[in-house]
Image (cartoon, rainbow, N blue to C red):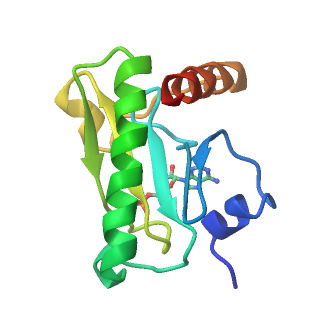
Amino acid sequence: MPTIFTKIINGEIPCYKIAEDDDFFAFLDINPNAAGHTLCIPKKEVNKILDLDEATYMGLMAFSRKVGKAIEAAVPCERVGITVIGLEVPHVHVHLIPLHTMKNATFQYKEKLEPSAFEEIASKIRAALK
Ligand code: AMP
């Protein structure tokens, strides 16, 4: 049974896509800690980050760094926080979170966004990636 993130990669479930290459995919978190909260995932379906082979782990970090720099350029914030949890979705994902205060890092405060706001922030981050 494919994970929900594999279904997103395959286009079976919609997402606000940010970037994709042969091995990795980035899209906005649907229940963001802050506007611009993005997930970077390997296309390879692996549950826990420490179980990734080293090349995929390093590649995911390099991909996340690129996307994180674009978020920093596109979304006003103090800095971009990088977190890996994985208790909800068993498919490795790196959270890139625009931080304004510590509460954005806690996963207990969520920001409600309209679809148009998701679209707008995704297109700003995509533009900053170019
Ligand atoms: P965790 O596994 O605890 O690191 O969290 C999984 C994250 O995936 C949460 O922040 C969810 O909001 C996010 N998420 C779950 N389903 C989707 C989806 N269909 N599209 C975008 N983000 C999702």
Q: Where 22 falls versus 116 (above or below)? A: below
The answer to which of 86 and 74 lies nearer the viewer is 74
Q: How many marks?
A: 0
Q: In this view, does 42 lie to the left or right of 114?
A: left
Give the answer, above or below, for where 28 lies relative to 78. Answer: below
Is 54 displayed left or right of 42 in the figure?
Answer: left
Image location of residue 111, percent across then percent down:
47, 28
For image coordinates 55% across by 66% down, the residue present is 23
Image x and y of residue 75, in percent: 41, 19
Which quarter of the figure is the N terminus placed in? bottom right
> Relative to 122, does residue 45 appear above or below in the rendering?
below
> Which percent across, then down, holds residue 108?
33, 42
Q: In this view, does 71 lie to the left or right of 22?
A: left
Q: Where is residue 28 in the image (x, y as percent from the top left)?
A: 55, 40
Image quadrant holding the C terminus, namely top right
The residue at 37%/78% (across/down) is 48
Q: Which residue lies furthest to the right in this view?
A: 12
Eyeballing the image, is 91 above or below 108?
A: below
Q: Quadrant for residue 13, please give it.
A: bottom right
The image quarter containing residue 61 is bottom left
Residue toward you, 69 or 51: 69
Residue at 38% across / 68% down in the picture? 87
Q: Residue at x 47, y 49 (%)?
A: 39
What is the residue that sits farthest to the left in this orientation? Answer: 102
